[in-house]
Image (spheres, rainbow, N blue to C red):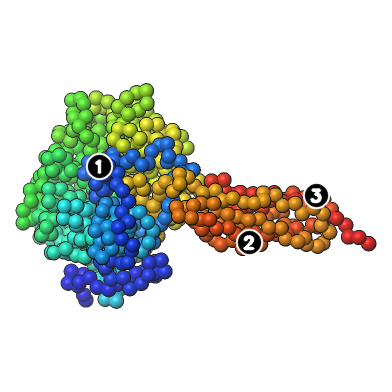
Amino acid sequence: MGSVTERTLRVLILAAVIAAAVGSGDAAGQAREVPGNSARALEPGFTGQLVYRNDNFRTGQNLNESVLTPANVVAAKFGLQFTDAIDAAAYAQPLYVPNVAIPGNGTHNVVYVATENDSVYAFDADAAGPPLWHTSFIDPSAGITPVPSSDLGCADLSPIIGITATPVIDPSSATLYVLSKVKLGPGSYQQQLHALDITTGLEMPHSPVTITASIAGTAPDGDADVVSFDPLLQQDRPALTLANGVVYLSFASHCDIQPYHGWILGYDESSLAQVVVYNDTPNGSQGGIWEAGCGPGVDTNGDLITITGNGTFDTAGTPIDYGDSFIRLTPNPGTPGTMTVDTFFTPLNELMLADDDDDMGSGGNLLLPDQPGPNPHLMVGVGKVGTIFLVNRDSMGGFNASVNQMVQQLPGAVGGMFSTPAYWSGEVPKVGLQNMIYTAGVNDHAKMFVISNGMIKTPPASTSRYASFGYPGTSPVISANGTTGGIVWAIDNSAWHSAGPAILYAFDATDLSTQLYDSSQYGADNPGPAVKFTMPTVANGSVYVGTQTQLAVFGLFPGGGRQQLTITPHMLAFGKVTVGTTSKAKEITIKNPANRKTGLAVNISMETASPSIFVVKSECETMLAPGKTCNASVTFSPTDTALVYGSLMIFDGVPGSPQSVVLSGTGKTVKK
């Protein structure tokens, strides 16, 4: 049986689902013909979106966005611009690198998308088209495939499991690090860390490396007091983390299928040698690092901070088991080295949390920039029960069976969290500069809390008025031009289980009751079927949303607004027509008045006439190009002598849709 480690990248055929869209026979890592030098001008100061939630504090903020503002992110001016087909669900956040020189294809702003079919795509970020390159880590002809979810008996990721964690990019070496999970054959599974050249998709030197690990411990699944990593049962949901030259991978499980542990493994980014092995329950079980896709935070001194899920908590052991805990870890790289727990916080009800499956680490860790007050280095975490914990990163509080000794807790302040809060320091009208935290829990509205003098103020300063997010909630992100122009972006993924559409929302970041945009307003703005834990990437005037079938790209419409089709005439009067006969057809003309050079085609999805005595026949194409016209005709067949009014409806997915044409006619009796 061939090993992915041993094979080189070879010619692969893209999956049938995208064959028609991007062609077949693409070599993995091979650039395709795309018109060169298409990179759009950059936002001042913008260097790309290279890591999950934009930075290692996991704030979710992009402070170099002046194109998209609360004034123009409205349905009349903003919406879906184009889509790119992908071969499976994209759980990973899209990443963005500007001005990438693609060999033989010029310079492009590039968006990178990873899928559960073990694919990585590089797309032109500014225009639809085939991928600049596509790399696949499977080889079905050799029996190497993504892991079928049926092999685990877990439908959490379904129907296949490949790349789940968001990759990370090092711009200095032009390298993208990504973790694949494959099935090599019956009962044989493998996870590998890959280092890919961002310009070609080819493996860099020393890549890939197969993931293995072991650590001393007395856990029940150990062998001779050695606990080993299981490539099938361990799931890498948290994003990859790059800090001080080490790429970190974090693991939990699939559907709590045991045995599993919370592992953090570190690899030297140049040699890919394993330099860190850490297990948070070496003498017990579980303690998975989930965080709904959020990778560990990295403090200013290089320490890793994470939140664990249900599992063994035991302060008497050596080492300690840290289920349902906030932990701060100092790396001690070696051959391999491990990590030291400098400080931790475990809530006093940790046993109840574990018994009731109320993981503390179901949500991600948000590290706050320095705050005024007695505890300048703070972090926020929220688990399944919706209690907000504000924790001092320098001295977390440990465990106390009588009272929780962290900075602040707000029980039930938000819906249960399977997501990560966001942070922004912005100018609020009539108030001034505010430090704000944003949440969107399960079956809860988006909420904004102000943090003042190192404490979270209650109640929330603003709440979304209409939008409420079902399970699993969502991880909001912020775009702003420094401290002004703040927008909160959030995806409603609650239809993920039924392949219903994702919904992209935008709110004014200074007042969440002001909803700016909602992609469900227009059928033409449907991003595609929702993915459980996705979040948008806002970069250089565009918003990128990964779905089960495609990458959806939103932005401002060329020319300043959506296109309104013109229809002439707006009334068809048939006069008197003999009962039992059919009139001569009357025509309307539909035109796309957009500029031929800068305008967009409009999708005319349907023309219907009612009541049924009016019948429409259409010559219109599905897509009407800028400057083009098409015709539709209507006939009238009266059944009695009454004056009848009807309507012809034209559905086109742009403002004012559907548009209508008034129909009228009167039946007359047959002359004897």
Q: Secondary structure at mark 1?
A: loop
Q: Say which of 150 and 616 sits in front.
A: 616
How much space separates mark 3 and mark 1, taking CA atoms? 66 Å
Does any portion of residue 225 appear in the rendered image?
yes
The circle on residue 45 is 1
Q: Secondary structure at mark 2?
A: strand
Q: Quadrant of the C terminus?
A: bottom right
3 or 1: tag closer to the N-terminus: 1
Q: Secondary structure at mark 3?
A: strand
Residue that protrudes farthest toward the left in the picture = 334
Q: Residue at x 66, y 62 (%)?
A: 617
Q: Say which of 590 and 325 sits in front.
A: 590
> In this figure, what is the number of numbered marks?
3
| Residue type (three-letter) at the residue carrying disc 1 | Gly
| Residue type (three-letter) at the residue carrying disc 3 | Leu
How much space separates mark 3 and mark 2, taking CA atoms? 25 Å
3 or 2: tag closer to the N-terminus: 2
**Percent of width and height locating residue 72:** 43, 39
Q: Residue at x 25, y 29 (%)?
A: 408
Q: Quadrant of the N terminus?
A: bottom left
1 or 2: tag closer to the N-terminus: 1
Q: Residue at x 42, y 46 (%)?
A: 556
The circle on residue 25 is none
Q: Is residue 471 left or right of residue 136?
A: right
**Percent of width and height locating residue 148:** 33, 66
Q: Which residue is mark 3?
A: 643
**Percent of width and height locating residue 552:** 39, 54
